[in-house]
Each structure stands twice: as structure tokens, then as C-alpha cells.
């Protein structure tokens, strides 16, 4: 596995290939990332991962400075998972001057849910992903990029960006990887104390309980707000601070209408703080 730190070296390495399969990351890798790397391998002729903690997607009060940087361990895991090339730029390489040009995803997709609670988050994500795509795919006819479904809205924002800018990149979603108790794997799980870690699975259990209520509802649009409120209340009683637990259409993340209450059309999404850690999860139903 080669590790490169500059865009020039990256492009030089990629000259020998026609179809990179690319997994972007911010490092501190867990089995969710490694599953994406394994999924990537048959999809391209070279498997590339990036490690870059992107300041642009963090608000000033968020955890940019303390976000775990575990470069050596990440590289060992990537090599083991079959990655061929790691692109690990520093901040000067990615942002040699203030990033004046930014990608602003449409409000109807990016200002709700995560975007509502983390204003500017999807501008930061879309901008760095566009830039990473330019670095990785700029020297090839196109390729494939993989994103985990745990960040459901992120995956959707990136899919729309690629479609609207007609980028020659296929976007592939990877299933959420879970710990034995059902907690969705996340780099931020490492912030949890032992007691919080034991409690953390309740977010996915709350989504499962909501799924049962959604499936039983005879008039989903009428029942939606009260079943969402009940789910938030259940978590709040256990000491969580929920941002949202909600039923949405998979197609556009808007609240469902009666015709959407069908198998394959809905997704439940949740975000809640447990102590100082904000966790997100979702469940397609
Ligand atoms: O999902 C992540 O780790 C990040 O948002 C991404 C896509 C690597 C952009 O920084």
C-alpha cells in the first residue's frame, strides 16, 4: 500500500489506472470504513482511501481539535483491508488559501435534519468531497466512490451533487456496520464512557420501536408527529438530549404522505446527545 500526502503524488500514482474505487474518510477508522474498503475492491482497478479531518465541516464549538487522529493505526487497518493507496493531505495541501469557492447544496435537502442542527455542515462536506473527487478522479476517466449509509443524509447530498454536476463518478452506499448490541459503528463512539456505551444502543432501539409503530399506523401522516414525540420522550426520560427522531421519505427526506406508507419508501432517522457525544442512526423500513 502506498501512502501519499500531496495531490501531485496522488495523481501521479493514479495515472496507471482507469477506474479508482474511492473511500473518503476522516480517519479514526472502524469496521464500517473497512467494510467500505472491502466493498470497493471489485468495483475499480485501484482502491484509494483518503484520511483528512476537514475543518470546513466543523462548527467552532464542535470537536475539530479533539477529533481523534490515529494515522499509523488507520494505515495498518487499511493495508489489512486491501487498500492500495492512501491519500493523507495536510491542511495546507487541501486548503493552501482560504476556500472561497464552496459547494452550497440546495436548502430543501441540506438545511433539514443534520443541516438544521449543524448549520453549514453540508457545505463543508460537499466542498471537501468535490475537492477530493477532483484530486482522485481528475487524472482518470471516472470511477466509483463509497459512503456509509449511517450518514444517510450525507450520502443523499453527495448523490445529488454528483448528478447535478454530471461528475463521472458512481456513488455506492455501504450498509451500516453495528456492534454486537446493535450500536451503529462511529468514530465518535470512542468518546462514550462505559456507562454511556451501555446506554448508546437505545438510539437504535428507539428507531426499531418507531418502525413497529409506523408499520401499525393506519394513517401515517396523522400519526407521525405523535409517534415521533413519543420516541423523543422515551430517550429524553433516559437522560438523552434528542435533536430529532423522525419518519421521512427515502427519496427526498421530506415527511411522508399517505401514498408513501409502503414497503421500501421510508427511512427513520435519529440524532441525540448522550453526555457530551452526539450520535446519529437510521433505519430503512
Ligand atoms: O463521512 C465522513 O467521514 C466525512 O464527512 C467525509 C465524507 C470524509 C468528508 O470529510
Image (spheres, rainbow, N blue to C red):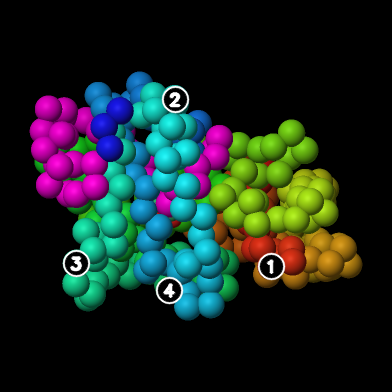
Mark 3 element type: loop
Up the image or down, 98 lies above or below 54; here it is: below
> Of the residues under marks 3 and 4, which one precedes in the sequence?
3
Q: Are marks 1 and 2 in contact (CB under 8 Å)?
A: no
Q: Are marks 3 and 1 in contact (CB under 8 Å)?
A: no
Mark 1 element type: loop
- Ligand 1 lies under 8 Å from the Cβ of mark 4: no
Label 1 sits on residue: 276
Q: Residue at x 88, y 67 (%)?
A: 237
Which residue is most to the front? 72
Label 4 sits on residue: 120
Q: Position of residue 163 (x, y in %)?
A: 29, 51
> Of the residues under marks 1 and 2, which one precedes in the sequence?
2
**Residue segment shown in magenta:** 4-32
Q: Residue at x 24, y 47 (%)?
A: 5
Q: Are marks 3 and 4 in contact (CB under 8 Å)?
A: no
> Of the residues under marks 4 and 1, which one precedes in the sequence?
4
Residue 71 is inside the magenta segment: no
Report the Cα–Cα distance between label 4 and label 2: 35 Å
Report the Cα–Cα distance between label 3 and label 4: 21 Å
Q: Residue at x 11, y 38 (%)?
A: 12
Label 2 sits on residue: 80
Q: Position of residue 61 (x, y in %)?
A: 53, 77
Q: Can the viewer see residue 196?
A: yes
Label 3 sits on residue: 96
Crowd class of label 2 (few under 14; some 14 to 19; many from 20; radius 10 Å): few
Report the Cα–Cα distance between label 3 and label 2: 32 Å
Q: Position of residue 47 (x, y in %)?
A: 31, 30
> Of the residues under marks 4 and 2, which one precedes in the sequence?
2
Name which quarter of the figure residue 203 lies in: bottom right
Crowd class of label 3 (few under 14; some 14 to 19; many from 20; radius 10 Å): few
Up the image or down, 52 lies above or below 55; here it is: above
Amino acid at each position: 500500500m502506498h501512502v501519499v500526502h500531496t495531490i501531485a503524488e496522488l495523481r501521479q500514482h493514479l495515472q496507471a489506472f482507469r477506474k479508482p474505487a474511492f473511500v473518503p474518510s476522516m480517519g479514526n477508522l472502524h469496521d464500517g470504513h473497512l467494510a467500505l474498503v472491502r466493498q470497493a475492491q471489485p468495483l475499480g482497478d485501484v482502491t484509494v482511501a483518503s484520511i483528512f479531518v476537514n475543518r470546513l465541516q466543523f462548527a467552532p464549538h464542535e470537536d475539530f481539535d479533539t477529533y481523534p487522529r490515529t494515522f499509523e493505526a488507520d494505515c495498518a487497518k487499511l493495508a489489512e483491508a486491501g487498500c492500495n493507496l492512501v491519500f493523507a493531505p495536510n491542511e495546507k495541501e487541501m486548503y493552501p488559501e482560504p476556500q472561497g469557492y464552496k459547494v452550497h447544496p440546495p436548502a430543501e435537502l441540506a438545511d433539514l435534519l443534520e443541516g438544521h442542527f449543524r448549520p453549514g455542515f453540508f457545505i463543508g462536506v460537499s466542498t471537501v468531497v468535490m475537492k477530493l473527487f477532483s484530486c482522485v478522479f481528475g487524472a482518470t476517466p471516472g470511477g466509483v466512490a463509497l459512503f456509509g449509509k449511517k450518514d444517510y443524509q450525507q450520502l443523499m447530498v453527495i448523490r445529488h451533487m454528483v448528478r447535478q454536476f454530471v461528475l463521472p463518478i458512481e456513488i455506492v452506499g455501504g450498509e451500516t456496520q453495528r456492534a454486537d448490541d446493535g450500536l451503529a459503528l462511529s468514530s465518535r463512539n470512542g468518546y462514550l464512557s462505559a456507562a454511556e456505551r451501555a446506554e448508546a444502543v437505545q438510539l437504535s432501539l428507539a428507531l426499531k420501536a418507531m418502525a413497529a409503530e409506523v408499520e401499525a399506523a393506519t394513517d401515517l401522516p396523522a400519526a407521525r408527529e405523535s409517534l415521533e414525540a413519543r420516541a423523543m420522550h422515551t430517550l429524553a426520560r433516559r437522560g438523552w438530549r434528542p435533536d430529532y427522531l423522525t419518519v421521512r421519505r427515502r427519496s427526498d427526506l421530506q415527511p411522508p404522505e399517505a401514498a408513501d406508507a409502503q414497503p421500501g419508501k421510508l427511512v427513520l432517522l435519529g440524532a441525540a446527545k448522550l453526555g457530551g457525544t452526539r450520535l446519529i442512526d437510521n433505519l430503512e423500513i
